[in-house]
Image (cartoon, grey):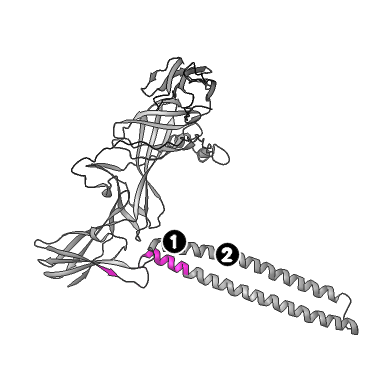
């Protein structure tokens, strides 16, 4: 016997590059024996080999198998696409109506022209015979002018209205095309079961769709006075599978199903070979994002409190983001989003919150003028969120008395649970950093000196704290490293001595600057090379 199953979507687990959809429903078996239970209108985008079915029923019931077949529809079956098609039909009729109106207006302009020609000839004949008054031409021309202006205004208004309707029609067509992927056809699952007796049978049907995914996104709100960072974690979910996800449990997972690969039995061979000539490295200058202020009065966020009593104002608080339920599942992390979620099949990002954590941090400024301008505020903390943080864009806000100010966007690197977390939170223009080349002298040498070219180079970095509080500033710079055996680099002076220096001569100074204090760091080095050896990397 053939039975039809209604199984709405109850859960969706979204991975970075796909999603698993679970539907659940039940059907009444009228008698014992074998039955075919059909579930229709499954999306065309599902991965056919991913279909899985589980079921429950009276004792002795058995699942015999599941088949997947194609359905063909004269029109898309989804409610959303039907609504879009109805809107497209309405807009198409509106365009046709406006085209007819423009055609009638053009005809009226033709009639007016013909009428004017007849009136002009009749008026001329009347004036000759003395049957027309001297002011008749003015009255006739005024009537013709007024009617011509009216028709011109109606034509321009109608053309503008038509352009707006056409743009709306094209937008709806693009939306419909994106939703249904160019094909209204769907799949149908047929579940073969054997019932031991009459009774209710329930089924869970799951499948994968590839037209879906999610990406992490973060907001960091730094409070410099309290030395803490409020880290909000969100998931941006997109899907264009052809079916709407509504009223279901949404789960996002960091698992990467496509990352399971077969490894070779032995490690690959490791070869060393000559590197091709390196291109000069170009560093992009750091950009300061504009301060995002609300338009109008900056006290607008508090305007709604003006009519409240003191007790009511005390009860007002910022809305907290609801944390998702977190679960470690082997190598993957799973976040079950609170509430019933709706994600339409429009391919647009839909943001859901998955975590909100307050992290105490050590705040300091980092300057690396050879890479980027300015002193960059850095928060050093631990990832105490209880789970690893995948890499993603980080939007930075600074909290203040007037509310949060948007600073800019950077990137949060992938960080394991409990690991050190470094967040770069924008440039402070009140801590100035100036790097300058103060010395460059070259002695090309003579034959008596062995033809050795000696170049002395000196740099100075000036740091100044223009804030009203002491600041910890870390300066990073470096000495050059020779990659040629005939080029020698000899440090001459480092003043003051750096806090640390790596084997690759990367230099770090850790400084504490009082309000208004200015500090100079200088270093000099000598580069010796054959006079006939041309090389790159020296400052000009």
Q: Within the image, what quadrant is residue 6 found in?
A: bottom left
Q: Does the magenta segment cover residue 84?
A: yes
Residue 31: give x, y in percent of width and height: 13, 70
Q: Is residue 134 left or right of residue 29?
A: right
Residue 41 is left or right of residue 483, and the answer is left
Q: How many marks?
A: 2
Q: Position of residue 423 (x, y in %)?
A: 40, 32
Asked whether residue 82 is in view, the answer is yes
Identified at 90% across, 83% down, the residue is: 128
**Residue at 39% across / 34% down in the picture?**
230
Q: Residues within 10 Å of mark 1 (few under 14, many from 20)?
A: some
Q: Is residue 246 left or right of residue 364?
A: left
Camera sees residue 307: no
Q: Is residue 364 above or below residue 209?
A: above
Residue 19 placed where, x, y %?
Answer: 30, 53
Residue 325, by quadrant, is top left
**Is 119 covered by the magenta stretch?**
no
**On-image quarter of the N terminus:** bottom left
In the image, which residues are magenta?
Answer: 69-88
Q: In terms of depth relative to the viewer, which is nearer, 323 or 456? A: 456
Q: Which residue is mark 2?
A: 163
Numbered tag placed on residue 221 in the rendering: none
The residue where tag 1 is placed is: 175
Nearer-the-camera pick, 470 or 446: 446
Question: Mark 2, residues whose alpha carbon is within 10 Å: few (<14), some, or many (≥20)?
Answer: some
SS at mark 1?
helix
């Amino acid at each position: 016997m053939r039975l039809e199953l209604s199984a709405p979507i109850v859960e969706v687990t979204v991975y970075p590059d796909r999603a698993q959809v679970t539907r659940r429903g039940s059907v009444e078996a009228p008698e014992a024996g074998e039955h075919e239970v059909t579930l229709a209108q499954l999306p065309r985008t599902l991965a056919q080999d991913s279909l899985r079915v589980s079921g429950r029923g009276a004792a002795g019931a058995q699942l015999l198998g599941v088949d997947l077949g194609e359905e063909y529809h004269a029109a898309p079956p989804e409610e959303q696409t039907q609504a879009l098609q109805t809107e497209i039909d309405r807009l198409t009729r509106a365009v046709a109506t406006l085209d007819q109106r423009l055609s009638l207006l053009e005809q009226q302009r033709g009639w007016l022209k013909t009428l004017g020609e007849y009136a002009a000839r009749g008026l001329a004949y009347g004036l000759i015979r003395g049957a027309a008054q001297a002011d008749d031409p003015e009255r006739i021309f005024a009537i013709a002018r007024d009617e011509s202006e009216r028709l011109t205004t109606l034509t321009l208004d109608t053309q503008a209205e038509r352009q707006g309707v056409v743009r709306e029609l094209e937008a709806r067509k693009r939306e419909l095309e994106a939703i249904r992927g160019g094909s209204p056809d769907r799949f149908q699952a047929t579940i073969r079961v054997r019932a031991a007796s009459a009774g209710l049978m329930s089924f869970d049907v799951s499948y994968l769709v590839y037209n879906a995914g999610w990406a992490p996104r973060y907001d960091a709100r730094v409070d410099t006075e309290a030395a803490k960072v409020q880290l909000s974690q969100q998931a941006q979910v997109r899907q264009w599978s052809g079916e709407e996800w509504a009223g279901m449990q949404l789960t996002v997972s960091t698992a990467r199903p496509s990352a399971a690969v077969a490894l070779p039995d032995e490690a690959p061979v490791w070869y060393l070979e000559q590197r091709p000539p390196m291109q000069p490295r170009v560093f992009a200058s750091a950009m300061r994002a504009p301060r995002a202020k609300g338009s109008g009065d900056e006290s607008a966020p508090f305007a709604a409190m003006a009519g409240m009593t003191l007790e009511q104002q005390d009860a007002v608080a910022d809305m907290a983001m609801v944390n998702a339920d977190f679960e470690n599942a082997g190598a993957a992390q799973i976040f079950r989003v609170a509430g019933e979620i709706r994600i339409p099949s429009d391919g647009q990002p839909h943001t859901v919150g998955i975590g909100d954590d307050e992290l105490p941090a050590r705040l300091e400024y980092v300057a690396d003028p050879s890479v980027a301008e300015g002193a960059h505020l850095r928060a050093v903390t631990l990832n105490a969120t209880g789970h690893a943080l995948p890499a993603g864009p980080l939007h930075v806000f600074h909290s203040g008395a007037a509310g949060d100010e948007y600073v800019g966007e950077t990137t949060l690197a992938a960080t394991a649970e409990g690991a050190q977390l470094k967040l770069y939170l924008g440039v402070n223009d009140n801590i100035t950093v100036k790097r300058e080349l103060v010395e460059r002298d070259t002695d090309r040498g003579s034959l008596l000196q062995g033809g050795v070219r000696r170049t002395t180079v000196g740099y100075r970095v000036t740091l100044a704290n223009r804030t009203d509080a002491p600041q910890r500033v870390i300066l990073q710079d470096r000495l050059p490293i020779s990659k040629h055996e005939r080029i020698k680099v000899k440090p001459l002076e480092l003043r003051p001595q750096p806090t640390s220096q790596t084997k690759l001569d990367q230099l770090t100074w850790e400084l504490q600057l009082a309000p208004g204090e200015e500090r100079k760091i200088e270093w000099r080095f000598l580069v010796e090379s054959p006079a006939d050896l041309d090389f790159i990397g020296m400052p000009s």
